[in-house]
Amino acid sequence: MNAAETGAWALLIQLAASTLRVSTPLVLAALGGLASERSGVINIALEGMMLVGALAAAIVTHSTASPWLGVGAGMAAGALLALLYGLCVIRLRSDQIVAGTAINLLAAGIAPFVCKVLYGATGQTPSIGIENRFQSGPTWMAFALVLAVAAWLRWTPSGLWVRFAGEHPEALSTAGIRVNRVRWAGVVLSGVLSGLGGAALSIQLSSAFSRNMTAGRGFMALAALIFGKWRPVPTALACLLFGFADAIQIRLQGVVLWGSEPVPVQFIQILPYVVTVLVLAGLVGQARAPRALGQFFDRG
Amino acid sequence: MADSLQGPAAAPAAVELRGLTKRFRHVVANAGVDLRVEPGTIHGVIGENGAGKSTAMKMLYGLYAPDEGQILVDGKVCSWRTPQDAIRAGIGMVHQHFMLAGPYTALDNILLGAEPSPSWAGFLPRSLRPVDRSAARARLQKLSEQYGLPVDLDAPIERLPVGIQQRIEILKLLYREARVLILDEPTAVLTPQEVIALFENLRKLKAEGKTIIIITHKLKEVMSFTEKVTVFRAGRVTGEVETAKTSPQELANLMVGRKVVLSVEVPPQPPLGPPVLELDSVALDRRHGKLDGVSLQVRAGEVVGIAGVEGNGQSELMQAILHPRDPGCRSSGKVRVLGQDVTANTTAEIKDLGVGLVPEDRHQEGLLLERPMTENFLLGLQRSPRFASGGFIRQDELEQACRNAIREYDVRPAAIDLELGRFSGGNQQKVVIAREFERKPRFLIAAQPTRGVDVGAIEFIHQRILRARTEGAGVLLVSSELDEVLALSDRILVFYDGRVAGEFKRGECTEREIGLLMGGGS
Amino acid sequence: MESWRGRLQPLAAVLLGLSLGLAVTAVAGENPWNVLKVLAQSSLGSWYDLGMTLFYATPLIFTGLSVAVAFQAGLFNIGAEGQLVFGALGVAAVGALAPGVPSPLAPLVGILAAVVGGGLWGFIPGWLRARRGSHEVINTIMLNFVAAGLSSWVTLYLLRNMDSQNPETRPVGAGYLLGHFSSVFGDAPFSGAFFLALLAAFGVWVLLWKTPLGFEIRAVGQNESAARAAGIDGARIRILAMTLAGALAGLVGVGEVMGNSGKFRMGFSPDFGFVGIAVALLGRNRPVGVIAAALLFGALQKGTAALDFETEHVTRDLSSIIQALVILSVSAEGLWSWMKRRKGGMGA
C-alpha cells in the first residue's frame, strides 16, 4: 500500500468517524422527535430541548466533574421543558407549532439568563477539561437506542400504543388506553432524548456550552425524521447523511475543487438544508405522516 | 318487569336501561329512557338523526355517564365510567366509523389494549412486556372458526374491504369476550350482498348465545332481522314492540310522530331541452379512484338520479365534472357542460356557465363553518358582478341578498352575522341551496341533498329540486338513499365499481332490481 | 364581530406572561418591581425612548403581518426570519450597486427591492407546498438557514464593506436613506418606515376584508375543499399568499437598511421573524391587533435592552423569555376554560 493510498484510507476513516460523532446529537434528537410524533404530537421544540440539555449538562459536568451526572442533568432539563410543552399542547390545547416555537424562544432566552446568573456572562459556560468529557459514549448510546426504539415500537404494548395514539387515537381510547397518557410519555421521552443529544453537543463534541450552540440541529433532526418516514432506522440513516454533509463541510473548508477559488464555506454549510428541501419536495408524496399528527385529543 | 318474551318470567334481561337521562349543557339528549334487551336475541334500536339512540348506547357501553337512571346487566345494577368497565361486564360496541388504524395489521388492531405476553416476562411492567402475537393469533383463529368469521390477520387494515373490516371489529369484541354486541349503523357502508353476509354472521352469533343490539334508521333491516324494536324520538323511547307484531308504517310513525308521506308529489315533467351534461367515456386512473369509462347525458328538464352504494365512483363522477383539468379527477374522456367542451376549463369557468352544486359533504365542501352566513353566501360568488365591483366586495348588496334568502328559504335563525357552524344541519343546507340557486343554475348537481337534514327541511329541499326541473334546469341527483332517488328521478343510473351498471326510467324498475345492480349483480 | 372575551383574552395572556417573566427575575435575585420600572422607564420614559420603541415595533409590524397573512391562507410562516434577511439584502444590494439613483426615486426602488427579495423567499415555500406538497413549516425553517448562509456569502464575497471590521455590505447610496425625526425623537433611528408599516397594515386589511381576492385567501385558509368546490384555485392562492407574506417580511429591510444602518449587517435581526409569530398570534391575525401587539413587543425589546446595564443579573434576553411566556399563554386555548371551570367550581 503506498503512501497516497494510506492517506486516502486514513482520510476516509477520519471522515467516517467524524460523521458518526457529529451525527450523534442529531440521532438522539430525531429519536426523541420520533417518540413524540409517532404518538401524534408535532415537536418543533426539539431545538429548545436540546439547548437546555446542552446547558444543563455543561453546568453540572463543570461543577461536579462527572460527565455522567452531566448527562443525567441534560436529560432532566430536556424532560422539564418537555413537561411544559406537554402541558400546553396535551392539556391546554395550544397549537403545537405555535407552542413549539415559543418553547424554542423560551430556551433561547433562558440559556443566557442562567449563564449570566451563574457565571456573570451570557456567552458561554466555563470550559470542561478533556478528562471529564465523553469521547464516544453518547455515540454508542445513540446507535444502541436506534435499535432499542425500533424494538420497542414493534414488540411492546407501549410501542403499539404510541403508534396507535398517532394514527388512530380513538381506537386506542376505546381499547382502554388513555391516549393523552401515551402522548405525555412520548413528549417527555422526546425531552429526555433531545436533552441527551444536547449533552452530547456540549460535553462530547465540544468543551462547554455556548450561546445558540444547537444551531438548528433540532430542526435538522425533525427533517431527518420526515426524511426517514418516522421510522427509527431510516431516520438514523438520514441523520448520518446530514452528519456526513456536516463532516465533509468541515473537511472541505478552504479546499479548491474547481477554478482557482476555494469553495465558499457558506455553500457547504447550507448544503444539508438545501438537500432537505429538495428531498422533501421530491419524496414527500410517499412519506405519510401519522394520521392524527398535530390533532388535540379531547378525553382520556 | 315480567314481560319477558322468551324463557321464564324471572330470567333477567341481558341489558336493561331504567330511566336513563343525559343532558349536555342545555340540551336533554335522553330523558327517562327505558330499554330491555332479552338474552340471545337481536334487538333493533331505531330513530331519526338526533333522536337520542346513540346517546343511550354510548351510556350503555360506558362512553358517557348517565345523569340519572340505572343500567342493569344480567339483572345486576352496574355503574361504569369508561368503555373498559363496560367491556369487562361483557358489553362492546362496533362503531359506525371503525376504530381501526389503516397501516397496521388486523392482528395488532384486535389485540390493542389486551396484549398477551409470555409468562416469563411477568417481572416487567405491563407496558414493556413483549407482545405474544402467536398466542393471540391462536386464540383468534379458534374464535373465527367458531363464529364463521374468517379474516387475514396479517393484512394491513387499509387493504381489506369494508365488510372484512367490520368482521375484524366484531372479532375484536369476541376476543374481549363480549356477550352483548352493539352495532351502530352496521349496514351504512355495505353492499346489499355484504349486508346479507353480515346478518348471517349475526344469526350465527345469536345461536352461540350472544345478544346483539343494532342501531339503525333502516326500517327494512329492522323488520327482517330483529326480534324486538325500541323506537326513539326526541330523546325519549316512544315504543318497544315485537317485530312480528308491527309494520314499517307503524315504526315510521313512532319515529317521526306524525303520518309521514313516504312519497313526493312530482309535478309533470316539462319538455326535454338540450343536454346540460354530456360525459364521453370519462375515466380515472385507479390510483386516484374509481371511474371506468362513464358516458352519460343529462338534459334540461329532467332529474337524473345516480343510485349506488357509496364509494362506487359517485364522488369521482362529480369531481370529474367540476375539476376536469385536475389529473387526480380525470385521466381521459370528454366532459361537456351546457353544450360546451369544458375538458380544459377551470372550475370557476365551469360554474360560471350556470352550474349549481350542492356538495355531498356540506361541512367539507360547502361551507365555512366558522364564518358568518354572509361570507358563506359569498363563497363562489365573490367575483360575480352582483357582489363585486371595482375590485371591492359590495357588502350592502351581499347583506341584502342574505336577508332575502333567509326569507325565501325560511332559514333559522335569521341572523346574517352568526357563524354558520351554529345553525342546524337543515338550515346550513338551506344556505348552500340558496347560494347555489342565486346563480340561477341551468345545470344543478345535488349530492346527498338531504343527508343529516330534519324532516321538514327534506320536503322543502325536494320541492326546490323539482322546481328547478320545472323551470327547465337539468338536475343530476346523487344519493345513497335509494328512496330519494326513486322518488325524484325521471331516469335512474345505477353505479357499481366506477361504472354505470344499469339504467331505468321512472316507474320502470323495482327496488329489488336496483339493489341487485348496486351490489354488482346483473 | 369578535366577542369581548375574544378581545380580552390576549390582554390577560400578556399580563400572565409578563408576570411569569418578572417572577423569573425574582429567582435570579432581582426585585421584579424594579425590573418592571426599568422596562417601563426605558421604553416610554422619554421621546427618545418612545422613538426607539417605535423603531423596534416597525419590523415587528411587518413580520406580524407576514405571519398573519399566511395564517389567514391556512399556512404557517415560520420563515419570516429568512424573508426579512432577503428583503434587507435586496435593498442593500440595489443601494450598493446603484448608489446614484436620486432621492425621490431611490426609496421607491429600495422598497421594491425589499418586496422582491422577501417575496422570492416566500414564493419558494409557497410553491413547494402548492405544487410539491411538502410542508411549509419545515421548508421555511430550512430556508431560514439557507438565507443566513447565502446572505453571509453575498456579504463577505460580493458586497463586502472593506472599510469595516464587521461583516456587512458596502453602504447604500445617499439617495436611499430615509430621514430621522430628530426634532421629536432625538437620536432614535425612527424613520418613515414606521408609516410604511402602518400603511402596509391598512393595505392588508383592505385586501383581506374588502376584496374578492382577500376573501378567496381567507376562504382557502378556512376550508380548502369548500373553496375548491366553489372554484377557487387553492394552489394559486397559497403561492400568492406566501409570496405576499414574504414581501411583507422583506419590508423589514426598508427600516433597517434605508432607515437605520445604511447597509446590510449580518445578524441584524434579533429574531424579528420568530417574534412576528407571537405578534400575529397576540393580534389574532388582524392588522389592528398586529399593530398593537408589535407596539407592545417593541416596548419590551427596548425596555429589556436597558436591563443589561440597569440590573445586576438580568439581561436583554429576558425579552425572549417574556415573549415565549406570552405566546404560550395566548396559545393555550384550554387555559381559559380551565380557569373558568376552577372559578365556577369554587363558586358552587
Image (cartoon, coloured by chain):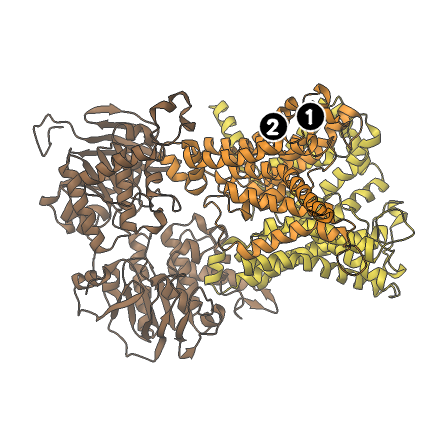
Quadrant of the drawing holding the N terminus of chain B: top left
Is residue C192 visible from the viewing direction of this image? no
Which chain's residue wears label 1?
Answer: C
Q: At 76% across and 54% down in the image, what residue appears?
A: A263
Three-letter residue code for mark 1: Ala
Is residue C128 among what the camera can see? yes
Looking at the figure, which quarter contains the C terminus of chain B?
Answer: bottom left
Rendered colour, chain A: orange
Above or below, comparing residue A169 to residue B289 in the picture: above
Q: Say which mark, if any, is on residue C62.
A: none
Chain identity of mark 2: A
Left or right of residue C97: residue A79: left
Residue at image x 28%, y 79%?
A: B271
**Pointer 1 and pointer 2: residues touching (CB < 8 Å)?**
no
Q: Residue furthest front?
A: A1
- Amino acid at the residue labelled 2: Met
Camera-side residue: B503 or A216?
A216
Tell me: residue C283, above or below residue C221. Answer: above
Point out residue B431 in the picture as x, y percentages from the top left corner. 42, 58
Specify whether C265 is left or right of C238.
Answer: right
User: For mark 2, what is the residue?
Assistant: A75
The tint chain B carries is brown
Q: Quadrant of residue B8?
A: top left
Residue pushed farthest top?
A: A64
Residue C23's disc number: 1
**Image location of residue B384, percent across then percent down:** 52, 69
- Cα separation, mark 1 vs mark 2, equals 25 Å
Looking at the rendered structure, the secondary structure element under dot 1 is helix
Tell me, yes or no, whether dots 1 and 2 are on the same chain.
no
Drawn colour of chain C?
Answer: yellow
